[in-house]
């Protein structure tokens, strides 16, 4: 199946051409940037990359080392949508952003109980509050996880239901939607990290470029949605070895934490609580 790159990638009113002063990102681990190492022991991620794209687009004739955008990232791994709303929305509003991203829902899908209406209501409330405060708000639907992690195929219906709900509430709130889940390339395992829950660096790069395109930044087109070349088939024994390694390194620790009621985000703080300048490097 090939992606239809003529597909409209956004819903709601297209953002008017404007210069953004402050970008604030709220969400969970994907917004935090896992698993896109920054080379300094932390994570970069699509939000950092998107901030750099915005800063670069706004730099104009100014020197490349002049900061033209402030950026804060309040996301914390493991957070459900309800906790993101409870813990991150008001701090985000207090920072008075004119650009924001709201991405949530995967941690709710992985829980034993899943209430799509409640999750959608929280997403709508966060989008609406930020839009009402004057921010351009972007979000995206979730990729189909089944091609990446076949063991979660029974949860695919939850992803599809949440994506439908995200499309609806985003249209109602006036936010801008990147319909990432409608593109097959978003579920290509080669764009996902070893844990199969997070994008790798190449995946984060594509999401950052897709958001830049959705925002209408100059220099970006729909090439982010192009499919990768056909994969090279691995010998069966290597596939089995990879599955066993993933089960041992990632699935068992994750299951153990959840059985104990723990989260990877316990006792963690966000990586960028204070808006700091983004330098528009070439």
Image (tube, rainbow, N blue to C red):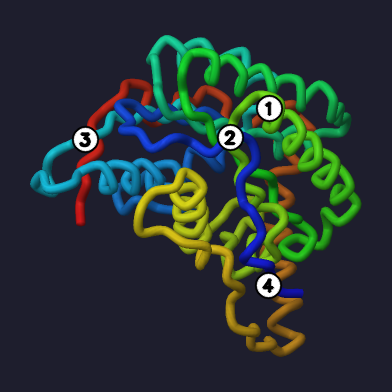
Are the residues flagged by discs 1 and 3 in contact, CB closer than 8 Å? no
Q: Residues within 10 Å of mark 2 (few under 14, many from 20)?
A: few
- Residue closest to the eye, 103 or 174: 174
Q: Nearer the viewer, mark 2 or mark 4?
A: 2
Real-space CA distance between mark 4 and mark 3, rounded to the nearest whole angstrom: 44 Å
* Picture quadrant where residue 189 is located: bottom right
Q: Is residue 246 above or below residue 57?
A: below
Rendered position, 191 above or below 49: below
At horizontal 86% and vertical 31% (from top left) the residue drawn is: 114
What secondary structure is found at the residue carrying circle 2?
Answer: loop
Q: Nearer the viewer, mark 2 or mark 1?
A: 2
How many other residues sit within 10 Å of disc 1, few (<14), some (14-19) or many (≥20)? many
Q: How many numbered marks are there? A: 4
Q: Of the residues under marks 1 and 3, which one precedes in the sequence?
A: 3
Question: Horizontal placement of 58 versus 28: left or right?
Answer: left
Q: Residue furthest left?
A: 63
Secondary structure at badge 3 equals strand
Q: Which residue is mark 1?
A: 80
Residue hosting label 4: 242
Number of the front mark, 1 or 4: 1
Q: Earlier in the sequence, mark 2 or mark 1?
A: 2
| Residue in front for this viewpoint, 19 or 190 | 19
């Amino acid at each position: 199946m090939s992606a239809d790159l003529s597909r409209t990638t956004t819903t709601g009113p297209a953002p008017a051409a404007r210069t953004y002063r402050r970008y604030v990102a709220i969400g969970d681990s994907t917004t935090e940037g896992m698993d896109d190492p920054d080379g300094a022991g932390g994570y970069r991620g699509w939000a950092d990359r998107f901030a750099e794209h915005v800063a670069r687009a706004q730099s104009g004739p100014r020197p490349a080392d002049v900061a033209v955008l402030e950026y804060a990232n309040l996301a914390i791994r493991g957070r459900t949508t309800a906790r993101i709303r409870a813990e991150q929305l008001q701090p985000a509003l207090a920072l008075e952003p004119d650009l924001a991203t709201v991405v949530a829902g995967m941690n709710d899908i992985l829980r034993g109980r899943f209430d799509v209406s409640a999750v959608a209501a929280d997403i709508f409330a966060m989008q609406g509050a930020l839009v009402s405060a004057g921010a351009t708000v972007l979000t995206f639907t979730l990729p189909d996880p089944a091609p990446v992690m076949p063991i979660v195929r029974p949860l695919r219906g939850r992803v599809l239901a949440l994506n439908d709900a995200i499309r609806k509430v985003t249209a109602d709130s006036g936010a801008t939607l990147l319909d990432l889940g409608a593109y097959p390339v978003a579920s290509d395992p080669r764009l996902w990290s070893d844990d199969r829950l997070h994008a790798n660096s190449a995946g984060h790069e594509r999401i950052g470029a897709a958001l830049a395109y959705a925002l209408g930044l100059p220099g970006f087109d729909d090439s982010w949605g192009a499919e990768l070349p056909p994969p090279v088939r691995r010998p069966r024994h290597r596939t089995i070895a990879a599955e066993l390694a993933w089960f041992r390194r990632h699935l068992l620790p994750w299951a153990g934490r959840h059985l104990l009621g723990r989260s990877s985000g316990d006792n963690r703080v966000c990586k960028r609580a204070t808006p700091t300048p983004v330098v528009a490097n070439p």
